[in-house]
Amino acid sequence: MTQLHQPGKLAPHNPIADDGDDVHFCSTCAFGSVCLPAGLDKIALNELHMLVEHVGPFHAGDHIFRSGERFGALYAVRAGMVKTRQLDDEGHEQVLGFHLPGEMIGLDAIHPAKYPCDAIALDTVFVCRFSFPALSMLAAKIPDVQQRLFDLLSADIGKSSRFSGDHTADERLAAFLLDLANRYAARGFASNAYRLVMPRADIANYLRLAAETVSRVLRRFQDQGLIRVDGRELELTDKPALLKLARHILRD
Amino acid sequence: MTQLHQPGKLAPHNPIADDGDDVHFCSTCAFGSVCLPAGLDKIALNELHMLVEHVGPFHAGDHIFRSGERFGALYAVRAGMVKTRQLDDEGHEQVLGFHLPGEMIGLDAIHPAKYPCDAIALDTVFVCRFSFPALSMLAAKIPDVQQRLFDLLSADIGKSSRFSGDHTADERLAAFLLDLANRYAARGFASNAYRLVMPRADIANYLRLAAETVSRVLRRFQDQGLIRVDGRELELTDKPALLKLARHILRD
DNA sequence: CGGATTTTTGACCAATGTCAAGACCGGTGG
DNA sequence: CCACCGGTCTTGACATTGGTCAAAAATCCG
């Protein structure tokens, strides 16, 4: 079992992003593409640094923000995994997403001017806090920052339509596993084996399935040799086959 | 049958938004809130007018833009109804949304820098075209325009998570009908009776149901006195009851 | 070690999809 | 004005995926 069962190795588990220094910002950060590429004006870079505040650690179950709170800042996950969710008046949960290091949360709070969901740490989490008023002022001064914000927002619209379609449990789960792998890969982490930080119930809720169904499908995927699962440790052993299942959902 | 069966009256059917003049922009337009409120600088207003181009008419089935086209502009629907949809490689359609006068389309195209979906007129449609490069330059100069763009983008993220949850056919249909009513009302149109411009199959696809299910549920709603349907003409006769069904979805 | 939580597994069930046929509707042309 | 035609919508019979319920097994922590 390569990669599985090696608690000593901290390799792909709970990866923590580079902290960055005065010149190089967190390398996996959502604003990395604005800052890192040579060009950016020293003063502008400093201003971006100025408005960022590192906060954490949060522990499993802690709230980064709560539904209904006044919106004041965007957050980038720096380490750990964050789940966003809504509760309706009867307490039914709806999981909106899982957020990896380098990804932004709170974008859906700009318009209503309050957070529309809870953001909850699934393990030990560090985040960067971007004061939004400060960020928009900077955006007005630096076109690249403005464009980056437009991009982040626009990408999120696309993302949310991804899992919105009508698909079988197999397709959804395959797409889910590959999507996580792709996102880990995009941030430079190992992506053929990773830890499912969230409980089955959260995966199920996110994919609009019952937890039992997730369990069964995972079992079958393993029997078919597509994956190896051991609790929350996961290895993708036949990506092409998974991709074939997921192709309707992961078009692009 | 109030409102139903009166083809002569053009009241709530195919409503067309006010055209606006040099000072007053289309009153239902997505940028109305930026322009109309007294304050806005005359020059700025002119600049906003400068970059807008009225285009149309489009007729049922015409494309406003196509999936894969290079992104260059956002569009606001000025009259008629537009459906956005994606096709996967096997031609399976996924309806992303239906867009009413005053609503913006193309926001999901900013990041990929190409339109990720088709926008198709469902009836006779007029739109406003906002050149995006011009718009972002203006946004950098005028904070209200920048904020308005952030708001539009952010609201769209929230919107797409609305119908993403796991709900029964009844709940989804009730929420769909009320959502349309609310959106018509928000733009100042009659909202207790309106025309479903799209075929049942599109509604079904959007809600992840079979067309037959939509037909059956609509029938049952009518038998229960919640609505009156006659072909595509619709009247909401018991909003409270519909709201009760839809409350899990339409929280807020 | 022990209790709580999570996950798995099996048996059964129901909501919704699928298939097929027929009704309806609007437009067209004779 | 009416008959026909293609598309849309409705309705019924039946099939199936995935949900629910219940219980056992595994896992996690303190």
Image: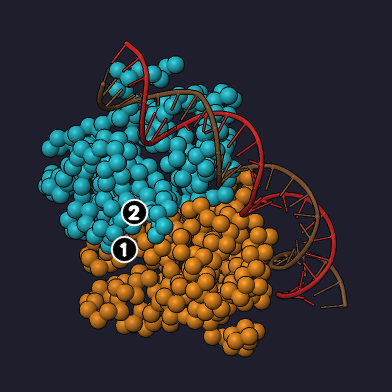
Chain colours: A orange, B cyan, C brown, D red
Could you say whether the residue bearing mark 1 is in a helix, strand or loop? loop
Would you place residue B102 above or below residue A194 in this image? Answer: above
Residue A178 x, y percent position in the rendering: 50, 70
Residue A140 lies in quadrant: bottom left
Would you place residue A55 above or below residue B88 in this image? Answer: below
Quick check: can you spot residue B146?
Answer: yes
Amino acid type at circle 1 is Pro
Task: Identify which residue, B138 or A228, lies in the foreground.
Answer: A228
Q: Which mark is residue B199?
A: none
At 58% from the left edge and 65% from the top edge, which residue is drawn?
A62
Amino acid type at circle 2 is Cys
Residue bearing mark 2: B117
At 41% from the left edge and 63% from the top edge, which residue is drawn?
A251
At 15% from the left edge and 49% from the top edge, which residue is drawn?
B51
Q: Which mark is residue B112?
A: 1
Q: State the CA–CA distance, disc 2 to disc 1.
A: 11 Å
Q: Is residue A83 rendered to the left or right of residue A152?
A: right
Disc 2 to disc 1: CB gap under 8 Å: no
Mark 2 closeness class: few <14, some 14–19, many ≥20 residues within 10 Å = many
